[in-house]
Image (spheres, rainbow, N blue to C red):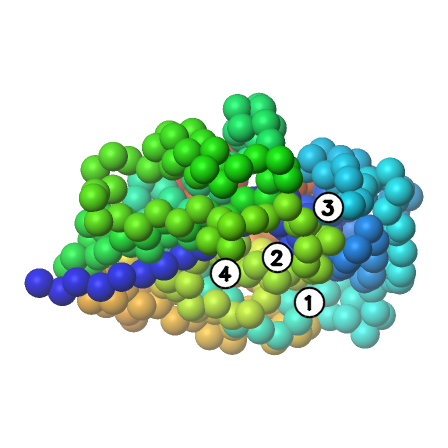
Amino acid sequence: MNKYYFTSESVTEGHPDKLCDTISDKILDECIKQDKNARVAVETFASQNKIALAGQITMQGQVDYEKIVRKTIEEIGYGDAKIDIDPKTCQIDINITKQSLDIAMGVDVGGAGDQGIMFGFASDETENYMPYAISMAHKLSKKLTEVRKEKIIPYLRPDGKTQITVEYEDGKPKRIETILISTQHEAEVTMEQLKKDIIEKVIKQTVPKNMIDENTNIYINPTGRFVIGGPLGDTGLTGRKIIVDTYGGYSRHGGGCFSGKDPSKVDRSSCYMMRHIAKNIVANGYAKKCEIQVSYAIGMEEPLSIYVDTFGTGTKSQEELVYLIKTKFNLTPDGIINYLNLKQPIYSETTNYGHFGKENLPWEKIIKI
């Protein structure tokens, strides 16, 4: 019997890094609404009552960046510069230029916008073909936001993190060893009340009963206090939660982030495509677990390499699966964009609680291959 433990984390939409991801993707969506061929690479930085935007945008149209920033901060639930950030008074610096002509020269003819390696992954251990730990961590983070916005736990603030340690036995999730939740809160609430509410209204409403036992460790706000949060408690930056965005560390990662990038950037669009293919290899019964790596060169259309690993669970050889991928799918940047219909303003839907495992997104569709 092979027993081991694996841990993944997630964050709420009010985490300072996710605030920045959300702003970047909201700007991207607005650009695509006005010009489906917009070239967008926008980064957001958040610190003490201040937001800085920087990047490159080439498009037909006009975007009110400041309005998007203030509206996003307000929608997330922030509103107090003394403990996080105030959408009405925060300073906003904007430094947006156009896409480099040297990069555009390669992208305009259908080539990749940069070199890089991208990964896609799927496993049959959950219904949405995601690793169990990251799937459960996302559910807890989403529930934290839900009970805050619906005022089920009215004293919660937007910033928060979750972490799950899963005990595996012979490669299958058996039980949850540890649940860790850190959530921002109003100053007047007691830790006893906070812990009780989080256990009863978040954990017990989210985690299956059969995955928790008397030996499961539950930690709520281990420091004992979390009043100052958001960009006041810690700076935020677009693209700093790449493991949260993907597979919780269960699969390898090429290093590129997603948010704020239009689909001509293969470190976003190709990762979506690799997830689609890996998921369908598992869903079609060719493997119980699948990881795919692909690589690109700037300005070139076709990928330089394709690698498939089914971790000993495959019903076809690696060579057969690579051949299947090459003959079934067009992996050029334009081919991926057209296949997944990526020139539409869907990116704000991807930002929080993972870019994978959400059935409404085009790369999650199960097909026959």
Q: Cα distance, mark 2 to mark 1?
A: 14 Å
| Relative to 313, residue 280 above or below | above
Q: Cα distance, mark 1 to mark 3?
A: 40 Å
Q: In x, y percent, where is residue 117?
A: 52, 72
Mark 1 or mark 3, whichever is nearer to me:
3
Q: Secondary structure at mark 4?
A: helix
Mark 4 or mark 3, whichever is nearer to me:
3
Kind of residue indicated by mark 3: Ile
Q: Would residue 83 appear left or right of 125 to someone viewing this image? A: right
Kind of residue indicated by mark 1: Gly
One can see residue 131 in this view: no
Q: Residue at x 48, y 67 (%)?
A: 253
Residue under numbered circle 2 = 258
Mark 1 or mark 4, whichever is nearer to me:
4
Q: Residue at x 87, y 38 (%)?
A: 88
| Relative to 114, residue 369 above or below | above
Tag shown at residue 113 = 1
Q: In x, y percent, where is residue 322?
A: 35, 66
Mark 2 or mark 3, whichever is nearer to me:
3
Q: In x, y percent, where is residue 171?
A: 20, 58
Residue under numbered circle 3 = 83
Q: Of residues 211 and 100, which is closer to you in this image? A: 211
